[in-house]
Amino acid sequence: MQIPVFRPSMGEEEIDAIAEVLRSGWLGLGPKTKEFEEKFAEFSKVNFAVGLNSATAALHLAVKALGINSGEVIVPAITFISTALAATYNNAKPVFADVYEDTLNIDVDDVKKKITKKTKAIIPVHYGGHPVEIEALLDIANEHDLRIIEDCAHACGSEYKGKPVGSFGDVGCFSFHAVKNLATGDGGMLTTNDGGIAKKVEQLRWLGIDRSTFLRSGRNNYSWYYDVMDIGYKYHMNDITAAIGLVQLRKLGKMNERRAEIVDIYNKNFGDMGWIRIPVKKDYVKSAHHNYVIKVEDRDELIAFLAEQGISTGVHYMPLYLHPIYSNVKTSAPVAEKIWKKIITLPLYPDMTPNDVNKVITSVKAFKD
Ligand SMILES: Cc1ncc(COP(=O)(O)O)c(C=O)c1O
């Protein structure tokens, strides 16, 4: 059987949690979503967490709730498209900063170079779960009066100097997409310490309506009246998603530990091979290890070779300005442009068996035999 790059780790507990919601008669935005939000806020050490249907929605609403509707937003050149689209959706221009060759995280010095009078915000991405240089970015943001939106899509469970990601910037955006560390199928969470932002996002996620159906439903009565305050979106989380999320949040620590174990085994086996550069981890961070990315010279040949052995791989990511949508953006990100041709994502997920891990290791080694 083919070994996938990612795979969600689901069990009977998640199935039972869904069944409970289906039997309860309340499937939409309701009590489970509220419970998940409260638990996630506690886990992230923030005052507020707002449940959404994706990190893309969280990023879109984060930029909007911060009042950004023009100007420029700095994002890393290497990330998923949602990070840049968050700016574009809000009529702002994404400006692509270069990345560090080792962590593939946004390069702080290049951010400084790319700040102009039009810059409104920076969206750093904790790539692969490895936290960015957030203290330096916060200093820059303070100096230039910029907002920081942390893209934590890869980083559920990551910490910078002992503090959870998503609690540093004005806003944090998490993804619970099917292959993420905490998976619910689709889903997202916006974290913030600012009650005004949380309130605004709660309204925007539900079509601009000021009181959700859940809030208008008491134990014995239902109040139909609401006001529509803004042009909102249908971006809220539902209770089926939240019920899976609550179980996954309880299991996250263990699942991330298993990821770390596999990363250790990979590192020990690939570390002295000469032709492979293994991922680095700074000693002041805890990584959620969302992915395992190595760097090799003959990347495309290795992808084809592993596919023949029944091993799927990925490339995360091509610099965004090489896609047609941003092809009119003139930018310089020489490291991103060089390094993306060498990166390859190997399989990593908590339910990988020792046999799966061994098969990946022996197959990679066989490439140069
Ligand atoms: C860095 C990054 N940001 C944002 C997203 C968007 O997440 P979602 O699929 O929950 O919208 C992803 C998803 O893959 C991602 O990798």
Image (tube, rainbow, N blue to C red):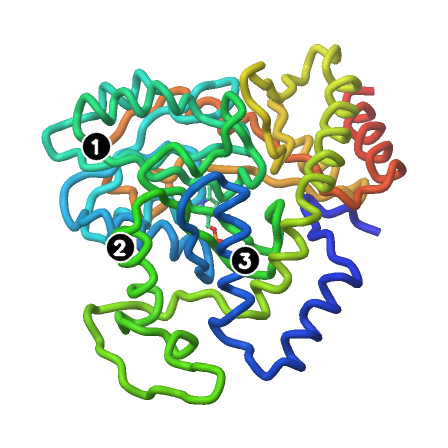
Which of the 4 image quadrants contains residue 19?
Answer: bottom right
- The residue wearing badge 1 is 146
Spatial separation of the CA atoms under disc 3 and disc 2: 27 Å
Spatial separation of the CA atoms under disc 1 and disc 3: 30 Å
Is residue 41 shown above or below 212?
A: above
Label number found at residue 89: 2
The answer as to whether callout 2 falls within 8 Å of ligand 1 is no
Mark 2 neighbour class, 10 Å CA radius: few under 14, some 14 to 19, many 20 or more: some
Which residue is at 60% across, 61% downward? Answer: 185
Which of the 4 image quadrants contains residue 177?
Answer: bottom right
Q: Earlier in the sequence, mark 1 or mark 3?
A: 3
Mark 3 neighbour class, 10 Å CA radius: few under 14, some 14 to 19, many 20 or more: many
Looking at the rendering, in which quadrant would you find the C terminus? top right
Secondary structure of the residue carrying tag 1 is: loop
Q: Earlier in the sequence, mark 1 or mark 2?
A: 2
Between disc 1 and disc 3, the foreground one is 3
Q: Nearer the viewer, residue 57 or 337?
A: 57
Is residue 287 shown above or below 9?
A: above
Label number found at residue 36: 3
Q: Amino acid at mark 3?
A: Phe
Q: Is residue 172 left or right of residue 209?
A: right
Secondary structure of the residue carrying tag 3 is: helix
Q: Is residue 36 left or right of residue 267?
A: left
Between disc 3 and disc 2, the foreground one is 3
Label number found at residue 237: none
Secondary structure of the residue carrying tag 2 is: helix
Q: Is residue 173 left or right of residue 287?
A: left
Which residue is at 52% across, 49% downward? Answer: 40
Q: Amino acid at mark 1?
A: Leu
Number of numbered discs visible in the structure rendering: 3
Which of the 4 image quadrants contains residue 246?
Answer: bottom right
